[in-house]
Image (cartoon, rainbow, N blue to C red):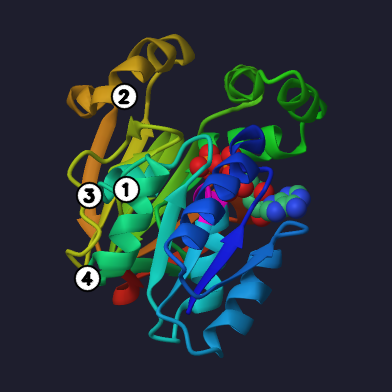
Amino acid sequence: MYYFIVNKISGNGNGLKVWKKVEKLLQEKQLNYQMRFTERPKHAVEIAKEAASEQCYAVVALGGDGTIHDVANGLIGSNIPLGIIPAGSGNDLAKALNIPMDYKKALERILMGKPRKMDVGKIGEKYCITVTGIGFDGKVAEVNNTSKYKNWLNFIRLGGLSYGLSVLHALLNYHPVHIQLKIDGKTLAFFNVWLIAIANIPNYGGGIKICPDACYNDGLFDICIVHNITKWELLRTFPKAYKGKHVFHPGVTILKGKEVEVTSEWPMIVQSDGEVLTKTPVNVTIQKDTLLIM
Ligand SMILES: Nc1ncnc2c1ncn2[C@@H]1O[C@H](COP(=O)(O)OP(=O)(O)OP(=O)(O)O)[C@@H](O)[C@H]1O
């Protein structure tokens, strides 16, 4: 049996549309499946835990990276593979793992493919699958998730605009911070830090290649620190990050490690997989080969 967890509202309502097509296909193929819609944020964690106690070949997250984050957090430890049918706005994990955006091909891969092992990050009791962003992009996630314009823009089908507005909003109000970074026991100091991205895959934010060489199964995080750079310079360099070319800027440092501890002169917001998790101080550790992905 295949168990589908569907976030109807992912991708500004794309989740429901994709599910209707997938459902038709499953019925045509006469496959044995079960489906649950998520009814609230974090509901997918509970559903995935229930699904993990059943005899299933895979639990499939139909939605974006937030849905995958929740389903993975419910599944880890169960040895049941996670399937992905992309239906979100960013779909960064699917992009990094070469999972097809087309629902038919994505389903085919779940039915025919071999599971592969993936590393995940761990913060407290929570697992993060893609990228943990601290500082500026934590602020962007917070502004975006709590903004009044997000729902309104989603309603008139301009949801994509809300992220851009949140970036501008965060940029106007954000002040760089002095931090201390401890990577695998070695302490480093960075001044005027805009963000620290601790990455298990190269991309986040719908295709920003923040750590171009990050690899999902190498047992390491790639860590990007953006520091000592003016607001204007940040804005000018930002577009380069879509091709991973920002790494050549002197204000960008890339490091690697298995355990990262961040302390800062005042608390910085921490987001993982686009969800606001906590504030600094924070400790992130790599958990090698912890999630099975179809
Ligand atoms: N029924 C629901 N009502 C409100 N929020 C929900 C519901 N179901 C799931 N959610 C929340 O919706 C959020 C967004 O989902 P998701 O990330 O999958 O879509 P997205 O933001 O469009 O895609 P992406 O993250 O790839 O850009 C998640 O944080 C999830 O917890």
The answer to whether one can see residue 266 in this image is no
**Which residue lies under the disc numbered 4?**
114
Disc with the residue nearer the chain's start (1 vs 4): 1
Secondary structure at badge 1 equals helix
Select label 1 or label 3 by which is in front: 1
Residue positioned 39% across, 53% down in the render? 130
Pointer 1 or 3: first along the chain: 1
* Location of residue 106 with respect to 37 vertically, above or below: above
Query: Which residue is nearer to you in this view: 290 or 220?
Result: 290
Asked if residue 256 can be seen in this view, the reply is: yes
Tell me which amino acid carries mark 3: Ala
Q: Nearer the viewer, mark 4 or mark 3?
A: 4
- Distance between the Cα atoms at labels 2 and 4? 30 Å
* CA neighbours of label 2 inside 10 A, class few (<14), some (14 to 19), many (20+): some
Where, quadrant-wise, is the C terminus in this rendering?
A: bottom left
Q: Earlier in the sequence, mark 2 or mark 3?
A: 3
Secondary structure under the numbered disc 2 in the rendered image: helix
The amino acid type found where label 1 is placed reads Lys
- Lower sequence index among marks 2 and 4: 4
